[in-house]
Structure formats: structure tokens, C-alpha cells
Amino acid sequence: MNGGYIVFGIANRPHTLRGLQGANLETFERLDPEQLTNHFNEHFSPEIEWSIHQYELEEKVYGLLYVNESKSKPVICCKNAGNELKEGDIYYRYRGRTQRIKYPELRAILDARREYEQQIWMRHISNIAQIGVRNVCIFDLHTGQVTGSGGSFLIEESLLSQLSFIKEGEFSEVKGKPALKLIGNVESIGTIPSRIGKKQIVKTKGIRVGDIVGTFLNKSPVTEPHEFIKQICFESTAFLPVYYYMHLAGLDRDNTIEMLNSVVSRSTSKAKLKERLTNKSTQQLSLSNVDTSSAKKKREFAMQLINNSVDPMLSGKKP
């Protein structure tokens, strides 16, 4: 209903992290995204948006299939497939199982869809009121006709399939469809990046405490500083170099807190990290004088920081 991940490489019972190895890993890497897209489109409507990733964590590889939340619910099965998929069925994820949807959940989806459409209408009406009724035109994406109080014009039918509207930040750097500029006539002015490109398996590596601290100390290049900040929410401590990654990401405290609000984490580190940012003060982690192994490690690490002689073994990597 809200989108989510399907993870390959986790045992069924118990749910231990095994990773993909041997033939299983080869099978995942040989997945043809184009065939998978065709399979989804053949059996479900409206279109299912998805992406596929290969994720490395603690020297183990996992396969991730992410399904985006549908913009037009419910998604309906439009073709039979063995005993699993039946035409006309709507499938819903209940706790621990997926099955045909029941009336209460279907009613909730339909009510949410009606409310969403009402919100869209209210935004349209608000925009029309600000622009002025006489200055507004309607662009029909199906017919190519633009109508308004000043008359109407048509966009050639052959160009309609080439038009696409994209949101800033949601396209990939791939040469795509032509950009059109209205100057009395619709003329092609070149090409722009398209968010729709050939899907491929994106390979990423998991971020852990050793990576967060080691990258900060070594000033290593970081392509996604936002992800380092988010990962702190899942660690056992919030006392990690968040301000360094905020600087790399160009975020201030308010922007960072807003981003953290969207992170779903059961760890108390998320609340503690937000508290650090909200207080706007320098905080120190007190080092206990007790004689436990954990306290000794903290004191040893603190002395290494002071002496600028951090042990590379602290990154968690094997020699």
C-alpha cells in the first residue's frame, strides 16, 4: 500500500542475514529488468514503479527490490498466472501474509483516493483563483488541445507521446525526450534528461559506524552525505560526526531535523540526534572510569583521537 522493499538473502526461519552466494547471487545479477517490467505491466494495472539494488553489508551481498507507492490505488491484477494471480483480484499485505483484500481495507483505500482527489481539486481551484479565471487554460494530455478564454490551439498528435512532465531532482542523467517551448507554435529546442531510462541493478554498500567515523577522520570523498546522517538513526549511539556530513550535504539544523523526521527507526539514537541538533550546543560524551571492556575501548579511542593516531582496525575491516 505504501511501497517497500523485498529483500533477497535473508533466511525464512529464523530471519538471519545470510546474503546471496553462488548460484543465488548469479541468478539475481542475471535478472533482466526489462523482462521484469514487462511481467509487471502484463499482470497488473496501473503500472508498478520499481527499482532494483544490490546491497553490500558486512561483506555480504543482498538483493533489494523496491516498489514505489502507487499513485493510483488500488493496483489490480489484470491477467491470470497459475494459482497465484487471478484476474480482477486486489492483493493486500496483512501481517505476515499477502492475500486478496478484504472490504475494510479496500474501503479505506477508496476513501483515501477520494480525499486525495478532493485535495487536488482544491489546489487547482486555489491556483485558478490566484491566476484569474480569464488567464487560465486547460491542457488535455490525451487530445493535445489547449483551451481557454482567449481561444484554443492544438499540439500535433505525433508530439503528444514525446511530451513528459518531470519534477526537479527526479530524473536520471540520461538523454531523453525533446523539450518543447511554447512561442506561438510548439517547436523542438533539443533534449532534456528523462527520468525514464533503462533499468539496471544499482550496487550500493551499507554504511556502519566504522564508515561514519572513518570517513570523517580521513576526509574521504562522500557522494551521499544524507545517507550517512540517516544511518546514525539506526546505530547504538547518536554521538557521531553529524555536523561534518551536514556541511557536505549543505544542510542546516532545521533541514536536517526535517529529513530525520522521515526516517523510520526504532532506535533511540534518532531522538537523541534530533535533541543534539535542537539544543544547538556543543555536546560531549562523558567517558566512564569503570573497568569494563566497553569503557576501556571508549577511552582508548578517545586518546587515539586526541593523539591523531586512530587504529584502522576500528573500522571493523578484517586485516
Image: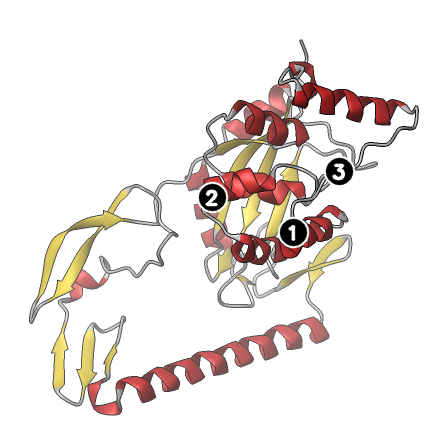
Q: Element under label 2?
A: helix
| Disc 2: which residue | 249
Q: Is residue 32 above or below residue 146?
A: above
Q: Residue furthest right?
A: 291
| Disc 3: which residue | 285
Q: Position of residue 118 (x, y in %)?
A: 49, 83
Tell me the crowding category of disc 1: few under 14, some 14 to 19, or many 20 or more residues within 10 angstroms, Cα based. few
* Amino acid type, mark 3: Leu
Q: Which mark is residue 84?
A: 1
- Left or right, residue 76 beside residue 32: right
| Image quadrant where one finds the N terminus | bottom right
Q: What is the CA distance from the residue labelled 1 to the residue labelled 2?
A: 45 Å
Q: Position of residue 3 (x, y in %)?
A: 59, 55
Q: Residue furthest left?
A: 184
- Left or right, residue 277 beside residue 161: right
Disc with the residue nearer the chain's start (3 vs 2): 2
Residue in view at x 67 percent, y 50 percent: 276
Closer to the camera in the image, 65 or 291? 291
